[in-house]
Image (tube, coloured by chain):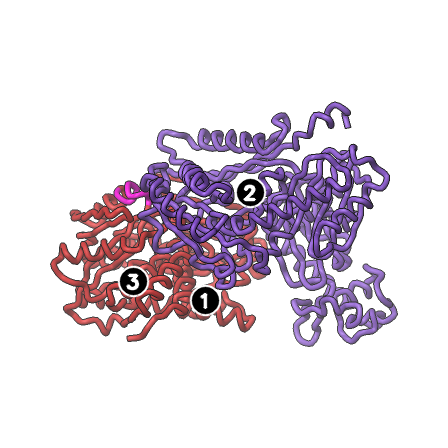
Amino acid sequence: MRLVGESDVDDIAVGAAVLGTGGGGSPYLGKLLAQQAIRKHGPVKVVDASEVDDSALVICCAMMGAPTVVAEKLPRGDELIKAFTTLERYLGRTATHTVSIEAGGMNSTTPLGVATQLNIPLVDADAMGRAFPELQMVTPTLYGIRASPMVLADEKGNTVLISAVDNYWTERLARSITVDMGATASIALYALSGVQVKETLVRGTIGLAQELGRVLRDTRAAHGDPVTAIVDRLQGRLLFAGKVVDVARRTEAGFAKGSARVEGFDADTGAFLELQFQNEYLVAVREGDVVVSVPDLIITLDLDSGRPITTDEIRYGFRVAVVGAPCDSRWRTTAGLELVGPRYFGYDIDYTPLESLGMGTAGGGT
Amino acid sequence: MRLGIDVGGTNTDAVLMHGRRVVAEAKTPTTPDVTSGIVTAIGQVMSRHQAGEVDAVMIGTTHFTNAVVEARHLMATAVVRLGLPATQELPPMVDWPERLRIALGHHVYICHGGHEFDGRHISELDPAELIRVAEEIGRKGIRSIAISSVFSPINGEFEEEAGSVLSSALPGVAISLSSQIGRLGLLERENATVLNACLRDLADHTVQAFQGAIGSAGINAPLYLSQNDGTLMAVEQARRYPVATFASGPTNSMRGAAFLTGLLDCAVIDIGGTTSDVGTLQHGFPRPASVAVEMAEVRTNFRMPDVYSFGIGGGSVVRSDGALAVGPESVGYELPTRALCFGGQTLTATDVAVAAGLADVGNPALVRHLDRELVRRCLNLIQARVAQAVDRMRTSAAPIPVVVVGGGSILLGDRLPGASVLVRPEQFAVANAIGAAIAQVGGEVDQVFTLGGLSRDTAVDSAKATAVDRAVTAGADPATVQVVDVEDVPLSYLPGNAVRVRVKAVGDLRLEAKHLATGG
């Protein structure tokens, strides 16, 4: 067990935005909300998955909806608690812990507020190991665990309980309700036992986020190279360094899709990398060769500062480093790829793990 | 003719312009009372002209920025936010530095009201609640109120209604509305509004002083103030929205420099002693920064020009032990004593430029011994850094003209990779005042449209029409108004095809009839 205080939240939010692979919301608001809660209710107890009792009841909580809307219609403050306790009442049990559903600027820090207000520990883990856009895209789905019963709450006091036949239906129903609630909702879902937490979740992501945030801060202070530091810590690969020369965006089936074209420099001079995104960065193609694809992490960092760059803000002129990092190994199974592989997002390519792909110079990819 | 005046921290500059021609210019020290410096500058440029020849006076000032940075002359301010039951978790001024929070008093209220992203009401406005708030504000003796409301950039009706309830309950109180100031992003827009509200007294006094200064020169022409986006606002607007003058200095400088070269689309680079700033102009206007901008440690989102700064200037220290490096360390203002060419001991970027024959500064004999190869590599390095910075700010891959100004501009030769042409304007010393004098009038829209049945083109057209209307209302000649910037970004994680559209329109200032009658 360790304690996370106000000052630790800065690092966690920034590090989580790195793991958010271009999506996952604003680290600034995530940070402010968590710090506000910690100021009122005290530091958060964080435990490793191994410390969780087999019989524990662990509930995921998150914010759902459009980050642009969250930045305008700020929370009332008790929505998450309401969603959480409503689910507890329905289950007839009190949760012993809470946990993040994803690693992202907003949702890595969201459960910190719940943990400190309800005085329960936060499990150092999450259900994606990165950010994904839909509720069923979590490792527990691979073990047949249901997202529902799930509760959505808004600032007006509305709560909606969903009991769905599968996790795709939960996503679909929850998305419509979120729009009705004003395009943001606070959610509690995936009630897990301690056994399930240990078996199904991606462990250590809060600690990892905090470490990434600290690495960025320390490397900058020492005038080191933040990009290399991030690559080393994630055992990833620096895939490309260059300048964004074109960004095209479009809305398709309710998703903000687009692509960014990066012109290389240094070792990549003369080459181009195309980054395709749908909320998160999903595929990177170099001269016709896929050099990394979802579910592996595609992390775009400001070349000088190492600051993670979201798909909302990427634009012409940004000098970026594109980094690939391996995803949780369960995403690489047949079932994992069916849930979050490139084809699910509409890309007609076969997934090849980052480590087996060429760097785009020869062979590699499709 | 137009009289442009720039009131900076150090100097007050003035130019008199006839059409595109600079007729007279002056530079005098800024005085503590501000007014007498302006009177002196006006006196100098008007020495051979009649006061009646001036059609309009444009003033750019850093006065309000400095007041906030120094936390001086700020009013106690109340903040009323409309959005209950939402937004309570992050109250107004939540992330402000203690120093400014104390200066303003931290009087914050959250009331009912606010809109959803699609225009529905979060809750109805409650006049009785607002009157209770007004009573408390009245008891505290506060005379300025900032009002914000959730999604007010989409619909400002609640802010306006609340404003009229509060001002009828508190006659004479100054009201600042967030929908008039910032973009989407409640905290940042509200912060900018609070900064505006605390400057209202100072704005009254300053504008009055400006008018007094002009009047005492016998000039009877309308007064305008420069805004940070390169457009003008009339005096009445300036009294109510002083915050719009923040960062008008760099904007005027860039626009003035570009004007002197006749370029509308270009990059402008100002190379100083320690750092350099690069910005770009599109259709003559600086591109606004897309991320939050901190103003005296307060996060805001108003239309600051997007300027990229990096650590190379005339005083940059050159290190050749190990890998060659120029800057970010600099001798700064000590250049005239510490640089080799001035008899000092430190090898600086200026020495390298002198050794290469690019500049005639100091004593060239003192740098003649420098290794030719080292000089060549240094200049290449500086050129590469500048080119990279310009490259970063460009919005398309095509080479663009680059305008170079500032004392450190000697570091660059005649060419720059990625630049179609490199231009060094004359008369740069008064570029800020020229930037003020040539400014136009604009209107802006930043709105989220839900495209249920509405096509993207219809949404963009509707935003364009609103922007044009706003420009005309602000004083633009309708015949000259043009849409200069359109940007639409789909909202992520949101089904239902919602799109955020930003449009900016500008036009020439509609001058008084007397100007038209005399054909001047």
Q: Secondary structure at mark 3?
A: strand
Read off the residue under disc 2.
B240
Say whether marks 1 and 3 touch (CB < 8 Å).
Answer: no
| Mark number, residue A126 | 3
* Residue B272, horizontal then vertical, whole percent: 71, 59
* Residue A242, horizontal then vertical, whole percent: 55, 56
Circle 2: is it few (<14), some (14-19), or many (20+) Cα within 10 Å?
many
Chain holding disc 2: B
Q: Secondary structure at mark 2?
A: helix
Q: Which quadrant holds the C terminus of chain B?
A: top right
Whether residue A180 is in magenta: the answer is yes
Read off the residue under disc 1.
A231
Q: How many marks?
A: 3
* Residue A129, horizontal then vertical, whole percent: 33, 61
Say whether marks 3 and 2 touch (CB < 8 Å).
Answer: no
For chain B, what colour was chosen?
A: purple
Residue at the (69%, 64%) spot, across then down: B274
**Amino acid type indicated by mark 3:** Asp
Residue at the (56%, 31%) spot, across then down: B473
**Amino acid type indicated by mark 2:** Arg
Chain holding disc 3: A
Q: Are marks 2 and 1 on the same chain?
A: no
